[in-house]
Amino acid sequence: MSLSAPNLKQPYYIGFWNDWSKVSILRPVLTLRSDYAKIFLVLLTIFITIVGSQLWRIVKFILHQVRSDPHKRDALYHQQQAVLRNSQDPYGALWYFAQLGWTWRSSTSRSFIRQLPVSMVALLQISGFLVASIFSGQVVTFGGPVLLRSENCGWANQTAQMTYDWQNQCTIRSRSDFQESANYVRTCLESQALMSCQGPKWPRIDSSISFGHTCPFPDSRICKNGPEGTVQIVSELMDSNRHLGINAPKEDSVQVRKALTCSPLLASVDSGYATARRANLTRNEIRNVSYIMYNYSMNAAGTKRIAAFVSPQMTKTQSDPVRAQFQAPYKFHPGNIAHRNKTVQSVFQPIPELNASNADLHIMGLANNLVYTEPFEDVWFGKTIPVPTGTGGLQTVLHYPNQTFAVLGCASQYQYCNPTNNQCSPWGGTSSIGQWANRQWTSYLIRDIGFNKKQNGTLAVVRAAIGLTSFIRFHEALAVEMLHARDQASVDLQVSGPLKNNQTAVEVKYWHDIQLTTMQKLLRDRPQGPSTPENLYVGDIENVGPLCHTQRETARTQEYASISVFGVVIVLVVGSLIIGLSWCYEGIARPVVRWWDRDRGERKMREWNSGELLHVQRMAFEANGIGHWSPEEKSIPVTARGEVFEAPQPDPNYKRSRTWL
């Protein structure tokens, strides 16, 4: 039995679909395997090359007509006109113009300058189609947006089997999800080096962080530092389509916003929230160890305060064996509660000062047993005190924290919105929207927002993903690994590099980003599900089932490509119009030229026709009295039926004029 994702031969949908994260004309997408996409791209490039050569037919005609002059001109002019008339593409024309400039440099003035206007036009078209070819490559995106195929749609149902093996597998899978997200946050969201970002790319969810908020708990006096120590981070309004990849139009999408507000709590014995106790143990090395009971919880009857967690009280002068019994670099003590319709669901019952009914409560006790190489001051990690030392030639001053245990309280809230009418629910905890039952939500927070059937299904899936990434599961999966400060710590030396003066804010943002990234990951994994379909949590089939075929992501492999249908249509339509116009432009231009320039229009068209290669050949034959040719108005001259003759030969007795020397 395994919770790994199934190894699908074809994990993505092949064919046409609409990407609802884009504007209307850009939505149609064609997904192909890379082999077929490469063939398609080659054909598209060939088509663009053909279009470029056909466009030159039109451009050179316009240039020829604009430059046509009824007055006598030198041979260079007539050669330029001949090049324009007979060149097949701008590359050949540009090469001919360069040769003309070089060859005529000693026979006429400004020979190169006279080539510039026509050369610039040819160069402009070459450059334009090089750019067009590059942009045509953007029509095909290897590793672009794709739709996931649905196999075992759903998530592992942790309650499907009440066995240690199954529960252990679920825990391992959850830890793997959070660890992958933590790595993504570090390498892709926090790192400035984009090359270090590996794996799937999630749509970025921006969040704003601010300080100076009021205490998030009912009794603000429990917040140790008041507003000065309170940090809040709020995500942007996450769209189920754009940010979470549930491919659907606006009228079937939902939006959600997450807020996390944290503040250090009073935790001293003098504050009344902690009690010191002597250990009732007989072992000599730990006989004198005292414990601190942090009384943030109530007993089941709600009549007595009890310890939410316990921490040994250590001093820096305690013997090393004693410290080794109890201390790791950082030790984490999490406690969590959640609310559903104002009913507490919790691993402990909070005291009234902390019992906020419109948020999930998280209490984290941090045992800080490190010394630091540099001083810092933070509301949760404490303030360091320099202590002289000098062992083995190492650093002579280390910095000890002024507190070995501190408590941080956090309140997480969610808000759900309907993008079709811009109505939003009040802020609430993870379970604030209740359950979907009897075709409606059991919570009063959601019913009046006006979600339709498809939106309710989307909301159910998003709500489930939020539950799977709650702080309770987050703590269970990572425990002390969720601390960003661990990156600076050396376990063997019990020494840490410097922390930031706002380290609490760094930690809060880190947790916030990991939860949001894990939510994106779980939604991406849902269509393919684990390899044990008998233990799936699917949800309401009527509303949630269709969403198994609507999950969008950026392909995790270059073996699949997404083709913009709009881009292909534009290339084909514009290219076809250019090709069609290139074959009939003379018929269209002839009456226009004659109407525009009555005096010279007919002469310009005759110059164009007579300069064509076959007409030049005709005139050469006629000059030698060979053949009976059709009128010059025809685009291709022909002789009388059955007429044959030899090609004209140069007269060996003819001597060319040398007066130009």
Image: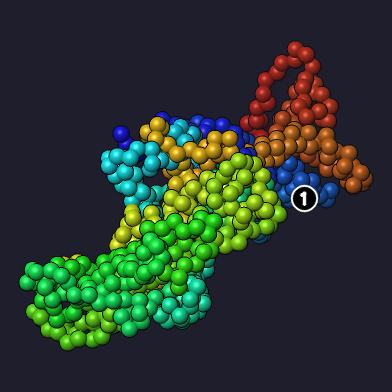
Instruction: Say whether residue 122 is left or right of residue 638.
Output: left
Question: Helix, strand, or loop for circle 1?
Answer: helix
Residue 208 shows in this picture:
yes
Question: Which residue is located at x 33 percent, y 40 percent?
Answer: 162
Q: Give residue 495's quadrant in the image.
A: bottom left
Q: Please state the horizontal and vertical placement of residue 52, each as a whole percent of the image.
A: 64, 41
Comparing 574 with 418, the one in front is 418
Using the rendered image of the protein, determine whether residue 558 is visible from the camera's viewpoint.
no
**Please, is residue 651 above or below residue 567 in the view?**
above
Residue 608, how many percent across, how many down? 78, 39
Question: Residue at point 80% right, 36% down?
Answer: 586
Whether 300 is drawn above or below 150: the answer is: below
Q: Residue shown at 38%/61% (left/top)?
A: 300
* Residue furthest left in the image: 284
Where is residue 615 drawn, in percent x and y? 75, 31
Q: Nearer the viewer, residue 278 or 523?
A: 278
In which quadrant of the rendered image does the N terminus lie? top left
In this picture, residue 400 sits left or right of residue 114: left
Considering only vertical position in the picture, is 630 above or below 521?
Answer: above
Is residue 580 found left or right of 527 in the rendered image?
A: right
